[in-house]
Amino acid sequence: MPTAIVTGGAIRIGRAMVLHLADKGFNIALLYHHSRTAGEETIEKARSYGVHCKGYSADLRILEDTELIIEKIIKDFDDIELLVNSAANFIQENVEQTQLKTLVETLSLNLMSPYLLMREYKRKINKGLIVNILDERVAKTLPTFAAYSVSKVGLKHLTELAAVEWGKSIRVNGIAPGLILPPQDSSPDYLGKAAKKVPTGSHGNLENLNKALDYLMENTFVNGETLFVDGGGSL
Protein backbone atom coordinates (compact mmCIF):
# COMPACT_ATOMS: atom_id res chain seq x y z
CA MET A 1 0.00 0.00 0.00
CA PRO A 2 1.57 3.36 -1.01
CA THR A 3 2.18 6.16 1.46
CA ALA A 4 1.68 9.91 1.09
CA ILE A 5 3.29 12.59 3.27
CA VAL A 6 1.07 15.67 3.64
CA THR A 7 2.14 18.82 5.50
CA GLY A 8 -0.59 21.02 6.91
CA GLY A 9 -2.80 17.96 6.70
CA ALA A 10 -5.08 18.75 9.63
CA ILE A 11 -7.14 21.56 8.09
CA ARG A 12 -8.41 23.15 4.89
CA ILE A 13 -6.72 22.04 1.65
CA GLY A 14 -4.30 19.70 3.37
CA ARG A 15 -7.10 17.90 5.19
CA ALA A 16 -9.14 17.52 2.00
CA MET A 17 -6.17 15.95 0.25
CA VAL A 18 -5.41 13.63 3.18
CA LEU A 19 -8.94 12.24 3.16
CA HIS A 20 -9.00 12.00 -0.62
CA LEU A 21 -5.75 10.06 -0.66
CA ALA A 22 -6.89 7.82 2.18
CA ASP A 23 -10.04 7.05 0.21
CA LYS A 24 -7.79 6.06 -2.72
CA GLY A 25 -5.91 3.61 -0.50
CA PHE A 26 -2.86 5.64 0.55
CA ASN A 27 -1.37 5.33 3.99
CA ILE A 28 -0.84 8.83 5.38
CA ALA A 29 1.97 10.55 7.26
CA LEU A 30 0.20 13.72 8.40
CA LEU A 31 2.16 16.75 9.60
CA TYR A 32 0.48 19.44 11.67
CA HIS A 33 1.45 22.16 14.13
CA HIS A 34 -1.13 24.25 16.00
CA SER A 35 -4.16 22.21 14.88
CA ARG A 36 -3.70 19.28 17.25
CA THR A 37 -7.40 18.62 17.83
CA ALA A 38 -8.18 18.96 14.14
CA GLY A 39 -5.19 16.76 13.39
CA GLU A 40 -6.45 13.98 15.63
CA GLU A 41 -9.91 14.21 14.07
CA THR A 42 -8.45 14.05 10.56
CA ILE A 43 -6.29 11.07 11.51
CA GLU A 44 -9.30 9.16 12.83
CA LYS A 45 -11.30 10.00 9.72
CA ALA A 46 -8.46 8.85 7.47
CA ARG A 47 -8.20 5.57 9.39
CA SER A 48 -11.89 4.96 8.76
CA TYR A 49 -10.95 4.26 5.14
CA GLY A 50 -8.94 1.26 6.30
CA VAL A 51 -5.48 2.79 5.91
CA HIS A 52 -2.65 3.49 8.33
CA CYS A 53 -2.44 7.16 9.28
CA LYS A 54 0.04 8.62 11.75
CA GLY A 55 0.36 12.23 12.87
CA TYR A 56 3.60 14.12 13.38
CA SER A 57 3.47 17.33 15.39
CA ALA A 58 6.05 19.63 13.86
CA ASP A 59 6.81 23.33 13.73
CA LEU A 60 8.19 23.56 10.21
CA ARG A 61 9.56 27.02 10.94
CA ILE A 62 12.28 25.31 12.99
CA LEU A 63 14.41 24.30 10.04
CA GLU A 64 16.87 22.13 11.96
CA ASP A 65 13.96 19.91 13.02
CA THR A 66 12.39 19.98 9.57
CA GLU A 67 15.53 18.41 8.11
CA LEU A 68 14.95 15.32 10.28
CA ILE A 69 11.27 14.68 9.54
CA ILE A 70 11.64 12.50 6.44
CA GLU A 71 14.08 10.26 8.33
CA LYS A 72 11.47 9.81 11.07
CA ILE A 73 8.70 9.01 8.62
CA ILE A 74 10.60 6.35 6.69
CA LYS A 75 11.06 4.44 9.95
CA ASP A 76 7.27 4.19 10.23
CA PHE A 77 6.18 3.77 6.61
CA ASP A 78 7.22 1.74 3.59
CA ASP A 79 6.64 2.52 -0.10
CA ILE A 80 6.42 6.32 0.15
CA GLU A 81 5.34 7.64 -3.24
CA LEU A 82 4.03 11.16 -2.68
CA LEU A 83 4.92 14.35 -0.82
CA VAL A 84 2.35 17.16 -0.69
CA ASN A 85 3.63 20.47 0.71
CA SER A 86 0.47 22.25 1.84
CA ALA A 87 1.45 23.91 5.15
CA ALA A 88 1.57 27.71 4.92
CA ASN A 89 0.70 30.92 6.67
CA PHE A 90 -1.15 33.83 5.05
CA ILE A 91 -0.49 37.21 6.68
CA GLN A 92 -1.87 40.45 5.30
CA GLU A 93 1.01 42.91 5.33
CA ASN A 94 2.23 44.79 2.28
CA VAL A 95 5.94 45.32 1.62
CA GLU A 96 6.21 48.46 3.77
CA GLN A 97 4.14 46.97 6.60
CA THR A 98 5.95 43.63 6.72
CA GLN A 99 7.37 42.93 10.16
CA LEU A 100 10.64 41.06 10.52
CA LYS A 101 8.82 38.28 12.38
CA THR A 102 6.34 37.92 9.51
CA LEU A 103 9.10 37.81 6.91
CA VAL A 104 11.22 35.23 8.72
CA GLU A 105 8.34 32.95 9.70
CA THR A 106 6.63 33.14 6.31
CA LEU A 107 9.74 32.35 4.30
CA SER A 108 10.69 29.59 6.75
CA LEU A 109 7.29 27.90 6.69
CA ASN A 110 6.18 28.51 3.10
CA LEU A 111 9.47 28.19 1.22
CA MET A 112 12.43 26.97 3.24
CA SER A 113 10.69 24.04 4.92
CA PRO A 114 9.34 22.67 1.60
CA TYR A 115 12.84 23.11 0.19
CA LEU A 116 14.32 20.95 2.96
CA LEU A 117 11.54 18.35 2.84
CA MET A 118 11.95 18.05 -0.93
CA ARG A 119 15.71 17.73 -0.63
CA GLU A 120 15.44 15.01 2.03
CA TYR A 121 12.73 13.24 0.04
CA LYS A 122 15.11 13.11 -2.91
CA ARG A 123 18.05 11.91 -0.81
CA LYS A 124 16.18 9.23 1.11
CA ILE A 125 13.22 8.14 -1.06
CA ASN A 126 14.05 9.20 -4.61
CA LYS A 127 10.87 8.08 -6.37
CA GLY A 128 7.30 9.14 -7.02
CA LEU A 129 5.83 12.61 -7.05
CA ILE A 130 6.10 15.90 -5.15
CA VAL A 131 3.20 18.35 -5.31
CA ASN A 132 3.62 21.87 -3.94
CA ILE A 133 0.49 23.86 -3.12
CA LEU A 134 1.03 27.32 -4.58
CA ASP A 135 -1.46 30.14 -5.20
CA GLU A 136 -2.87 31.92 -8.22
CA ARG A 137 -0.98 34.97 -6.89
CA VAL A 138 2.22 33.57 -8.39
CA ALA A 139 0.94 34.91 -11.73
CA LYS A 140 0.02 38.34 -10.34
CA THR A 141 1.72 41.35 -8.80
CA LEU A 142 -0.35 42.05 -5.69
CA PRO A 143 1.60 43.48 -2.73
CA THR A 144 -1.22 42.98 -0.21
CA PHE A 145 0.24 39.76 1.22
CA ALA A 146 3.83 40.57 0.33
CA ALA A 147 5.89 37.96 2.21
CA TYR A 148 3.35 35.25 1.35
CA SER A 149 3.46 36.14 -2.34
CA VAL A 150 7.26 36.13 -2.38
CA SER A 151 7.30 32.72 -0.69
CA LYS A 152 4.88 31.19 -3.19
CA VAL A 153 6.69 32.62 -6.22
CA GLY A 154 9.90 31.18 -4.79
CA LEU A 155 8.22 27.81 -4.27
CA LYS A 156 7.02 27.80 -7.87
CA HIS A 157 10.57 28.41 -9.09
CA LEU A 158 11.86 25.70 -6.74
CA THR A 159 9.26 23.34 -8.21
CA GLU A 160 10.68 23.97 -11.68
CA LEU A 161 14.31 23.67 -10.59
CA ALA A 162 13.70 20.33 -8.87
CA ALA A 163 11.66 19.05 -11.81
CA VAL A 164 14.59 19.62 -14.14
CA GLU A 165 17.18 18.19 -11.75
CA TRP A 166 15.21 15.16 -10.54
CA GLY A 167 12.89 14.30 -13.43
CA LYS A 168 14.34 10.85 -14.03
CA SER A 169 13.35 9.64 -10.58
CA ILE A 170 10.86 12.16 -9.13
CA ARG A 171 8.31 14.34 -10.86
CA VAL A 172 7.69 17.73 -9.20
CA ASN A 173 4.60 19.83 -9.92
CA GLY A 174 2.50 22.55 -8.34
CA ILE A 175 -1.19 23.28 -7.88
CA ALA A 176 -2.17 26.96 -7.73
CA PRO A 177 -5.64 27.35 -6.19
CA GLY A 178 -7.74 30.42 -6.77
CA LEU A 179 -11.02 31.22 -5.03
CA ILE A 180 -11.63 27.91 -3.28
CA LEU A 181 -11.96 28.59 0.45
CA PRO A 182 -12.76 31.83 2.26
CA PRO A 183 -10.08 33.28 4.54
CA GLN A 184 -10.52 32.30 8.16
CA ASP A 185 -12.93 34.61 10.04
CA SER A 186 -14.33 36.05 6.79
CA SER A 187 -18.02 36.87 6.31
CA PRO A 188 -20.44 34.14 5.15
CA ASP A 189 -20.94 35.87 1.79
CA TYR A 190 -17.22 36.24 1.04
CA LEU A 191 -17.06 33.61 -1.71
CA GLY A 192 -20.21 34.83 -3.44
CA LYS A 193 -18.98 38.41 -3.60
CA ALA A 194 -15.45 37.51 -4.64
CA ALA A 195 -16.71 35.17 -7.37
CA LYS A 196 -17.97 38.19 -9.34
CA LYS A 197 -14.33 39.03 -10.15
CA VAL A 198 -13.53 35.54 -11.48
CA PRO A 199 -13.93 35.03 -15.26
CA THR A 200 -16.21 32.02 -14.69
CA GLY A 201 -18.34 34.05 -12.30
CA SER A 202 -18.02 31.27 -9.76
CA HIS A 203 -15.78 29.91 -7.06
CA GLY A 204 -14.21 26.48 -6.87
CA ASN A 205 -14.28 23.80 -4.21
CA LEU A 206 -11.97 21.28 -2.59
CA GLU A 207 -13.04 18.56 -5.01
CA ASN A 208 -11.62 20.66 -7.85
CA LEU A 209 -8.23 20.55 -6.12
CA ASN A 210 -8.47 16.81 -5.48
CA LYS A 211 -9.15 16.25 -9.17
CA ALA A 212 -6.07 18.34 -9.98
CA LEU A 213 -4.04 16.15 -7.63
CA ASP A 214 -5.41 13.03 -9.34
CA TYR A 215 -4.38 14.40 -12.73
CA LEU A 216 -0.83 15.02 -11.57
CA MET A 217 -0.61 11.56 -10.04
CA GLU A 218 -2.01 9.78 -13.09
CA ASN A 219 -0.31 11.66 -15.93
CA THR A 220 3.29 10.54 -15.60
CA PHE A 221 4.54 12.79 -18.40
CA VAL A 222 3.66 16.00 -16.54
CA ASN A 223 6.70 17.42 -14.75
CA GLY A 224 7.62 20.95 -13.67
CA GLU A 225 4.14 22.33 -14.30
CA THR A 226 1.90 24.56 -12.21
CA LEU A 227 -1.75 23.63 -12.61
CA PHE A 228 -3.93 26.68 -11.99
CA VAL A 229 -7.32 25.80 -10.49
CA ASP A 230 -8.78 29.27 -10.37
CA GLY A 231 -11.51 29.77 -12.95
CA GLY A 232 -9.12 31.96 -14.90
CA GLY A 233 -8.63 34.34 -11.98
CA SER A 234 -4.89 34.46 -12.45
CA LEU A 235 -5.42 35.95 -15.90
Image (spheres, grey):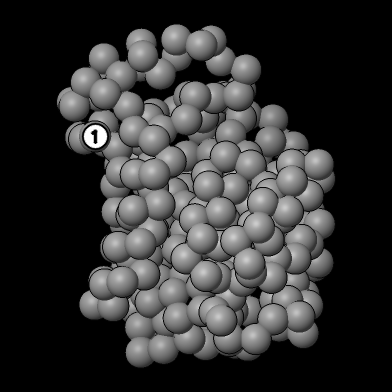
147 relative to 133, above or below:
above
Please determine whether, in this image, residue 221 is positioned above or below residue 57. below
Residue drawn at (34%, 44%) of the image:
208
| Amino acid type of the residue tagged 1 in the rendering | Gly
Residue at (75% x, 65% y) in the render: 54
Where 148 sits versus 20, above or below? above
Left or right: 158, with 61 as reference point: left
User: Can residue 91 be spotted in the picture?
Assistant: yes
- Which quadrant of the figure contains the C terminus? top left
| Mark 1 residue crowding within 10 angstroms, few (<14) / some (14–19) / many (20+) | some
Residue at mark 1: 231
Viewer can see residue 86:
no
Q: Picture coordinates of residue 2 (x, y %)?
A: 54, 79
In this orientation, which residue lies closer to the viewer: 27 or 109? 27
* Relative depth, front residue between 32 and 98: 32
User: At numbered mark 1, what does the secondary structure look like: helix, strand or loop?
Assistant: loop
- Judging depth in this view, the residue of 68 and 195 nearest the camera is 195
